[in-house]
Amino acid sequence: MAKARVVITLKETIMDAQGQTVEKALHNLGYQGVSDLRIGKFIEMSLDGGPKDQLESQVDEMCRRLLANPIIEDFQVEIEQ
Amino acid sequence: MAKARVVITLKETIMDAQGQTVEKALHNLGYQGVSDLRIGKFIEMSLDGGPKDQLESQVDEMCRRLLANPIIEDFQVEIEQ
């Protein structure tokens, strides 16, 4: 059984209001050195066997169909067997 | 300037209702091979310099104080310089 890990982030050109709010909160707590904070999603799942490249393209398809919004989000898929 | 990446996930013993819902949606789309799907958060930020272990313990502290809820969540910190 393989493991897939997906990281979904807003595209660089999209404003991340949630990230900006958390960055400001960290500054208020004294962490002045923090910048460019952005928040995304992390999804992990188990997958029934198959060759690695086939699983990768399957998870890629899941991202485009359901997990991510390809208009405003980028995603990275990692398969571990 | 260093980069920090944080992955925050629900502890294994905590039920992930959102993950279960997404897993069911993937099954309905025909991806029957998916199981144990869990959803977490991914946070990346830039940090002003300093030695790697110092930055790591700083981000660790941020997680415990603000970014994560250590009662129900685990977090992993990765620093790239």
Image: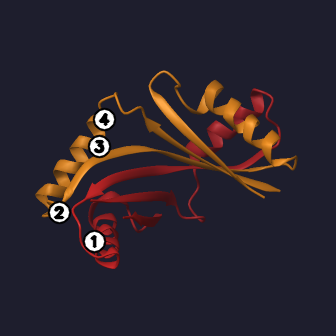
Chain colours: A orange, B red
Question: Left or right of B72: which side holds A18?
Answer: left
Label 4 resides on the chain identified as A
Label 2 resides on the chain identified as A
Residue A16: give its label. 4
What amino acid does circle 3 point to? Gly
Q: Residue at x 22, y 56 (%)?
A: A34
Residue A31: give its label. 2
Q: Residue furthest right?
A: A50
What amino acid does circle 1 point to? Gln
Q: Residue at x 38, y 62 (%)?
A: B69
Crowdedness near tag 3: few (<14), some (14–19) or many (≥20) residues, C-alpha within 10 Å: some
What amino acid does circle 2 point to? Tyr
Label 1 resides on the chain identified as B
Dots 2, 1 in contact, CB < 8 A = yes
Secondary structure beneath disc 3? Answer: helix
Question: Left or right of B19: which side holds A11?
Answer: left
**Residue that numbered label 1 is attached to:** B58
**Spot occupied by residue B51 in the image (x, y as percentages of width and height):** 29, 76
**Residue that numbered label 3 is attached to:** A19
Q: Which residue is drawn at 37% across and 60% down?
A: B68
Q: Distance between the residues labelled 4 and 1?
A: 23 Å
What amino acid does circle 4 point to? Asp
Q: Which residue lies furthest to the top in this view?
A: A71
Looking at the rendered image, the quarter that the C terminus of chain B falls into is: bottom left
